[in-house]
Amino acid sequence: MSIDEYDVVVAGAGTAGCYAAATIANEGLDVVIVERKDAEEAGHIACGDALKGADNFPGAIPKDRLEPAFTNTGVDHGRFEIPQEDTVLEIPVPGELAVIDRWEYGRQIIAGAEEAGVDFHYDTVINDVLQADGGRVTGLRAKRKGSPVTYEADVVIDGAGSLSLLQDKADFSDSTFDTNVRYSQFCSAYREVVEVPEPVEWDDALVFKATDRAAGYLWYFPRTSTEINVGLGFQMNEEPMQLVEALKRDLRNRPEFEGAEVKDKLGAALPTRRPYDSAVAPGYMAVGDAAGHVNPTTGGGIAGAAYAGKYAGEQAVKAISDGDLSEENLWRYNKRVMDHFGGRYAGLDVYNVLATAVDVDDLMGLLASLPGEKLAEALYEGSTSMSFGLKLKAAIQSFGYWGTIRNFYQTKSLADELLDHYDSYPTSPAAMANWTSERDAVMDRIYETTGAEPKY
C-alpha cells in the first residue's frame, strides 16, 4: 500500500472542493483532490445549470476562467407555471443570473485549481477515514485505479457531496459535528439536456412548474434558445417513478419539444434542509452539499459551495500555520458560513417545513395571488415585507385563502425569529449546546404552528 502525504486532502472535485483546494494551494501548501471519476468525467454533475451571483464569486479561481461555461446570460426572471390555477407568474430574480453548461463549468474550475497548484488523483474511491487517538481526522484510505493508497494530511476537507460516505465512516462523538442527518432531508433530482428544433419563446426565463404533489417540481432552464435543461426534483421519501412520469407527460404536452433530441441524462441527490449546525471536527471540515450548503427552496448550491470552499480553505491554512487542528481552531469556518448564507438558508427551510403540511391546491392558489416581486424576495432572501397598498391588493386577490395566509404569516414571523437567532451563532463550540437548545425551541413552535412533522 502506498502512502501519500499532503498538508490537506480534499474529497471531491466539485465546486466546494475545487475552491477550497485552490485557496490552500495559492498559499503555498501541498493539497490534493481525490475524485472517484476519471479525468474525462470529472466535473460532469447533475445540475439545473442555473447560476446566481457569479459576479461575486471568490477569486481563488479567476472569474474569467468560468466564462466559457456561461451559455445564456440573458435570463432575468423566473416563470412559475401553476396548472392548478391556470396561471403563469413572471417573477423577477434579484442579482446576476445565468444558465451554464455545468460540465464545462466543472472542467474550468478543475483547470483553475490545477493552475493554482492543486494535485488531482482521479479514479480514486474512498473507503475509510483515518483518525488518531482523541478523534482527530488524519487522512483517508482509498483505492486509486484499483490499488490501495493511504492519504495522510493535517486537514481533511469533505466535499464528497450529499450523504457523504466520509461522515458514515468518521467517529464524531467527541465533537459537535452535526449528525442529525436523514434521507428525508434530501431531494433526488433528475435532469436531461434536450435540443429542440426551434428557439423557445422563453429563453430569457427560468421556468418552474408545480406538479400535483407538493413534494415535486419540474424545471425548464434554457442553456441557449434551443438547448434546454429539463428536470425534476422530489423529496427522497416520495415515489420517484410517479414523478418522473409527470416530467415525461409534461414534455409530451409541450409543442416546442416535439422532435426534440436528448443529449445527456443524469441524476443526483441534494440537500433540502438547513446547513449543518456544525461542519467541523478536529482535523476535518465538510463543505458544499456535504454540509447542507444549498438554498433549500430553489436547490441552488454553486455560489454557497464556492464560498464554503473559500472559508474552509482559509481556515485550514490558519490551523496548519498555528499548529492547532482542534475543533476550536477550525470553528471560525462555521461562523463565517452562518454569517454569510447559512442563517438565511435555515430561515428558508422553514417554508419547506410549512409546505409539507399545506394542501397543494391551497398552496398553488395562494402563490398565484401574491405579488411576484415579493415571492422572489421570499425565495432568495428568506424574508420579505409589503407596503399597506400591496397588502390590501394581496388581501383582495387572495380571498378564499385567508386561513392559509394566516398560517403563512405566523410561520413567517417564526422564520424571522429563527433568522435573528442565527445572527447570534456561537463563536466557539463551548456555547453550541445552549444555542442549539434555544434554536430547537423556536423549531418546536414552528412545528406546532404549521402542523408539520418534525424534520430534525
Image (cartoon, rainbow, N blue to C red):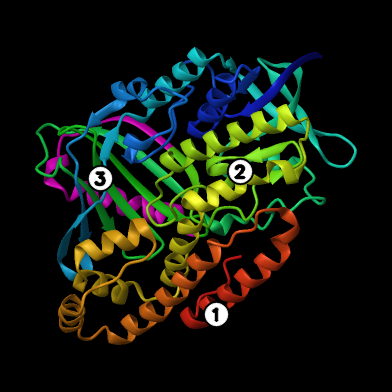
**Counting residues from the N terminus, which is met first, the one under dot 1 or under dot 2?**
2
Say whether residue 187 is visible.
no
Most foreground residue, 100 or 314: 314
Task: Specify the segment rendered in magenta.
Answer: 238-266
**Distance from the alpha carbon under mark 3 to that under mark 2:** 35 Å
Residue type marked 2? Tyr
Which secondary structure, mark 3? Answer: strand
Any mark on residue 350, and which?
none
- Give left or right: position of 25 versus 110: right
Quadrant holding the N terminus:
top right
Residue type marked 1? Arg
Decide whether residue 244 is among the magenta residues.
yes
- Give left or right: position of 53 versus 83: right
Check disc 2 and report the residue beneath it: 333
Tags 3 and 1 touching, CB below 8 Å: no
Residue type marked 3? Tyr
**Distance from the alpha carbon under mark 3 to that under mark 1:** 36 Å
Decide whether residue 91 is among the magenta residues.
no
Any mark on residue 445, and which?
1
- Give left or right: position of 114 versus 106: right
Check disc 3 and report the residue beneath it: 220
